[in-house]
Image: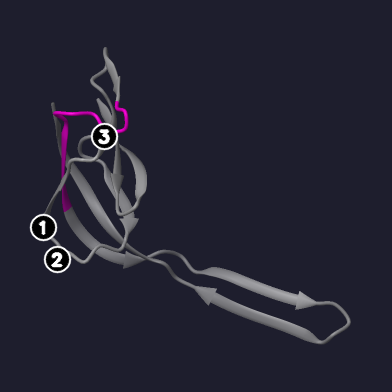
Amino acid sequence: MYAVVRLAGKQFMVKPNELLDVPLLDLEPGTLINCDEVLAYSDGTDVRVGKPLVEGIKVVGEVVSHGREAKVMLYKMKRRKNYRKKQGHKQHFTRVRIKEITA
């Protein structure tokens, strides 16, 4: 069983009891998330694809924690000009556990 949902502006394929890292949400850990924007759904035998959404399917998740991803290094250089610039960036995320997918 799986579903494709739109969450935090991105699309994710989710399964029950799966941990998912989504862009930062302004929610406390332990909060339940009800996602009604289901784009596709499969129960193992039947596949339903929405135009644009599938009606009657609901995905429930729970916010587990917040964190930061691994650092991405950025390096710019222009040859023969003595220009070098090194930057780092860590993206914030929210970890969500998918509790159930109900039809």
- The residue identified by callout 2 is 28
Q: Which residues are magenta?
A: 50-62
Q: Amino acid at mark 3?
A: Lys
Q: SS for tag 3?
A: loop
- Vertical comparison of 81 with 68: above or below: below
Q: Position of residue 9 (x, y in %)?
A: 34, 52
Label ID, residue 31: 1
- Vertical comparison of 24 with 4: above or below: below
Q: How many C-alpha atoms fall within 10 Å of the one at disc 2: few (<14), some, or many (≥20)?
A: few
Q: SS for tag 2?
A: loop
For marks 3 and 2, the one nearer the N-term is 3
Q: Position of residue 102 (x, y in %)?
A: 12, 30
Residue drawn 10% across the image and 57% down it: 31
For marks 1 and 3, the one nearer the N-term is 3
Q: Amino acid at mark 1?
A: Thr
Residue drawn 25% across the image and 25% down it: 1
Image side of residue 99 versus residue 12, left or right? left
Q: How many C-alpha atoms fall within 10 Å of the one at disc 1: few (<14), some, or many (≥20)?
A: few
Label ID, residue 40: none
Q: How many C-alpha atoms fall within 10 Å of the one at disc 3: few (<14), some, or many (≥20)?
A: some
Q: Quadrant of residue 3?
A: top left
- The residue identified by callout 3 is 15
Q: Quadrant of residue 45?
A: top left
Q: Main secondary structure of the magenta part?
A: loop
User: Could you tell me if the residues under marks 1 and 2 are in contact, i.e. CB atoms within 8 Å?
Assistant: yes
